[in-house]
Amino acid sequence: MLYHWVEMRAKMRLMGFNAAAVKPLNEDAAAELGAELLGEATVFVVACGCLVLEYWRHQAHHRRKETARRAAWSAMRDEVDHLALALAALHDQVRAAPQQRALEELQVQMREVRAQLCARDPPSAPQAKPKE
């Protein structure tokens, strides 16, 4: 009944009539208006519920997607760090390789010099000790 009274007063004022006296609805019309209002309210509540649930589902999907993106970014950053360490190790090996090669060349040259010295000076036979 309150809905009918408010609705009729608003309509009358919009049309420019005096809305002082609004006749009440009969029982059948009031029951039909109440059923219509209940049906519209039910549809409105269900539609709002669907919108809220869809919003929550979308937010959950967005959070999962963001989490997966951050995990992929973190994995890529870890891989880059690992590759940087491997590159630094290879760089150190490349730096050390010429020094190692030079050391090996010096060792080979020392062996050659020893071999040449040994070839020039054959080991002398042990000398006999004079008997006293």
Image (cartoon, rainbow, N blue to C red):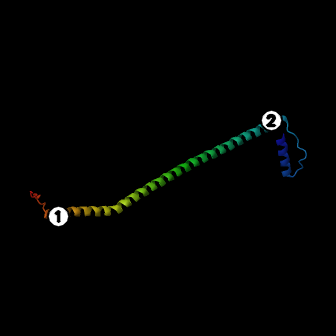
**Residue 7 pos. (x, y %):** 82, 45
Q: Considering only vertical position in the picture, is 117 above or below 47? A: below
For image coordinates 16% across by 62% down, the residue present is 118
Say which of 124 and 109 sits in front: 124
Q: Quadrant of residue 82?
A: bottom left
Q: Quadrant of residue 31?
A: top right
The alpha-carbon separation of the residues under discs 1 and 2 comes to 127 Å
For image coordinates 86% across by 50% down, the residue present is 13
For image coordinates 27% across by 61% down, the residue present is 104
Say which of 117 and 63 sits in front: 117
Quarter of the image where the C terminus is located? bottom left
> The disc labelled 1 sits on which kind of residue?
Leu
In the image, taking residue 53 as reference, residue 23 lies left or right, namely right
Q: Secondary structure at mark 1?
A: helix
- Which numbered dot is residue 117? 1
State the residue position of label 2: 31
How many marks on residues?
Answer: 2
